[in-house]
Image (cartoon, helix red, strand yellow):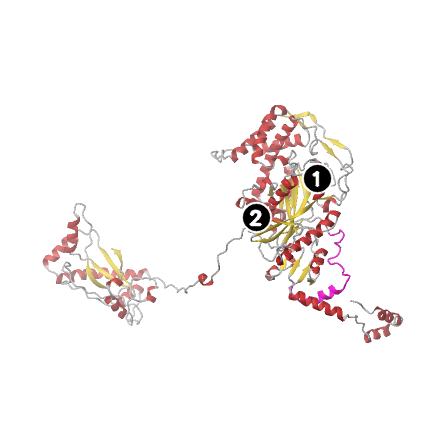
Amino acid sequence: MKVDGDVKSDLQKQHMPVAPLEGRIRCSRVTLPVINLDRLRMAKALVDRAVKERKVFSVQGPYPVVRAALKARGWVERRLPHNPPRGHCHGDQEAEGMEEIDSSDDDDGTDKGQDEDREDNIDDMYDLMSRLVRNETTHFYWTTRRDTVDYLSLQKDQMTNHYARAGCFTTKVGLCMSLRNLQWFDSTDPDTFFPRCYRLGAEDEKHAFTEDFRRTACTSLLQFVAERAEGGRGEDRTGELYNVKQAQGFVKQHKLQSSYRVGAGLIDTALHVCQEYLNSLDHRDIDIALETPPTLSDQQWEDFIHSYYLVIHDGMMLDQCTEYAERCRSMLIRMQKVCPQLETDGLCNIWIIKPGAKSRGRDIVCMNRLDEILNLVGKDPSLVKDSKWVVQKYLERPLLVQGTKFDLRQWFLVTDWNPLTVWFYRECYLRFSTQPYSTYRLDSSVHLCNNSIQKHFQPSVNRDPSLPTENMWSCTEFRSWMAATGRAGLWEDVVVPGMRQAVVHTLLTAQDSVEPRKASFELYGADFILGRDLHPWLLEVNASPTMATSTIVTTRLCPAVQEDTLRVVLDRRYDRSTHTGGFVLIYKQAPVEVPQYIGINLLVEGAPLRQPRAPPSKTFLQSRYKLLRKARPALSTSGHTFAKEDQSEKAKTTQSLVPSPKLTVEQSLTFQPMLERRRRRLAMPSSSCHLPELSEHPHLHTSRVRLRIHSEQAFACAHGSHRNVLSVNRLSPSLEIISLRPRYSRPANQRTHALSRSTHTAHISHPVLRMHRYLSLVHQQNIDNYREAPKDLKSPKRLELSD
């Protein structure tokens, strides 16, 4: 805002000599800025309109293109509080979580346009409007880091340019683990577009990497024999043989140690190892016992690897290469069918080691010796413990432009995860190395194409002068080079379809892990490298890709991709026919049918659980049973007083047929719903019951017996105490005998009809007892009602107590 500078300068000149007077004048006169009421009214009207239409945005980071594009659409910026940046403030970031960020950016923030977190506005109108919306809700966030915004507090209509839990494919470890699940989503083998990768922090994967390194050494040795027999030693197609171009401009020749030679047994061992690997894939080793020793012991492997180093790295001669050439070619053809990366493995067995918590290519090294790789990883116990070290097979035979290595940066946009919606940008750019390619130089200036690394090196004098000095090409320039080399149609037929499929397959494996927030979107940057056949290989995926305009190529492409992103995520929400610029929709899943929500059918009802009563003690049951045993002789004596002489003799005869006396107990339930939920326990009834009349049942020749056992005596036997007064609700156990039934074993030679006849006439001295569950003085009336109930309402359950 403008200040009355003339008044301020006059005051300073007038009161400069006298300090006390200057202090009094400053206190008496206050300079106020000149306020333009018309501009204030206009700013207030624009702010009110933006708030009403929910067009308040916040940007964190140096994104002048995003700010200008949003302001042109009528949005008003609400400035975020300026916090000191953690690490770097701009670049490719691989968000692993809320606390740890694994980034891999191309620029360190020192390029042009990256010095300040916000640009200076020529017109102070936007500053005034930003102050007016400082207490309003932000509806659009564009930040560099995901954890800048609290996602848990966002409303449904608030948009942001990040997804939660995207580290499952934007980190080195996450991408390595995620692509292993591709078999559950698609039939494509991840080894066809992603180099083999292992986590060295995990013991099982460390062992798998060791086996892979040894097997790759065998296939590399077979390729060396086959190519040497064809006369390939003199060629230097990829710089990987014996001519190594140095930065100083001369060629260093590997001196062949002709005085020392390696025997042909090394080739036999490599062929044997490859054959065993093929047998394991065909499950031909299923019958081999576990005790069978491996193909090679650890010491034999060390000797083999040492001899391999002598031949490949030191140039020692190998005997009988010509004789073994045909067998090596045949084995390589068979291995090619099961190893898609055999063509790019090369001869030197180079692996690239990436620490998971570093960015901008820091501490990324290339190595070709197994012991050095394992020793490097073991130096940092924290990274090993968290499985942050990743080792990946290096593509030793990439496509080269004038003998120089390059990789591609490709943008893609995800606007929804359920259903998965992917947009692919039409243009990309290439990043070149400053040094000629060679597999015998493992320097980062040769093998790492990150701009943050290559900008520290001067281009080699041996590099082709037709390559750009800024080490970048657009895809248009690359297509022109392809057309000049006779491969014009392979860009649209091979490169672009391969990159699209790799992106879609990667996102499918991460779909279940990323949080699918509807109002979010995210722009990613994928790095690819091309093989000799122009097949693209995915290296990594970066969140928050760099938008620094560090070269002529990025100055044109980066603003365009930001503008087109806003077209897709903002303009297309209101008009589906809006032009989306360079973005093309390449994948959208079919919508998943979700059953309609009906609340009444999802109602869950429950009932409180009652505390179960303690089960009766064994002493109580045994005391009742002892009383029954004591009362049994009385039953026999009293029964004979009412029976006739002939009937008693028949009963004695029938009793001899019974092998062992048993006591049959009938347990019936009363009509008490609340009492039925309690745990069943055997309790003796509190009152006696009359036996059925013999006249009504003439087939039963028995006596009427009534027995009552007092509760006081039973309770004293059970608990060792005597109580004279019974509670009203306390159970009063008693016993009633209702019938006598015969129980005996049927003889083997006796017929069925004879047995059934004796059942009705035999005398049995063992009574059938009915045990009522809950009988007390209070429940006596319910018991009587139960006895008078119809028979179909009664469902007695019989239990047998053996003597």
Q: 580 or 717, which is in the foreground? A: 580
Evaluate if marks 1 and 2 touch, with contact meaning CB atoms under 8 Å apart. Answer: no
301 relative to 7, above or below = above
253 relative to 459, above or below = above
185 relative to 673, above or below = above
Quadrant of the image for the C terminus?
bottom left
Q: What's the CA distance linking mark 1 and mark 2?
A: 30 Å
Q: Secondary structure at mark 2?
A: helix
Residue for point 70% across, 39% down: 405
Residue for point 75% across, 58% down: 119
Quadrant housing residue 183: top right
Q: Is residue 618 visible?
A: yes
Q: Position of residue 259 (x, y in %)?
A: 69, 24
Q: 491 or 518, which is in the foreground? A: 491
Q: Which mark is residue 601?
A: none
Residue for point 12% across, 55% down: 650
Q: Is residue 441 visible?
A: no
The amino acid type found where label 1 is placed reads Lys
Quadrant housing residue 204: top right
Q: Which mark is residue 508?
A: 2
Q: What range of the chain is rendered magenta? A: 109-137
Q: Earlier in the sequence, mark 1 or mark 2?
A: 1
Identity of the residue furthest to the front in this view? 577
The amino acid type found where label 2 is placed reads Leu
Q: Secondary structure at mark 1?
A: loop
742 relative to 471, above or below = below
Relative side of 374 to 697, left or right: right
Our reading of the magenta stretch's main secondary structure is loop
What residue did someone put label 1 on? 405
Q: Position of residue 17 (x, y in %)?
A: 89, 71
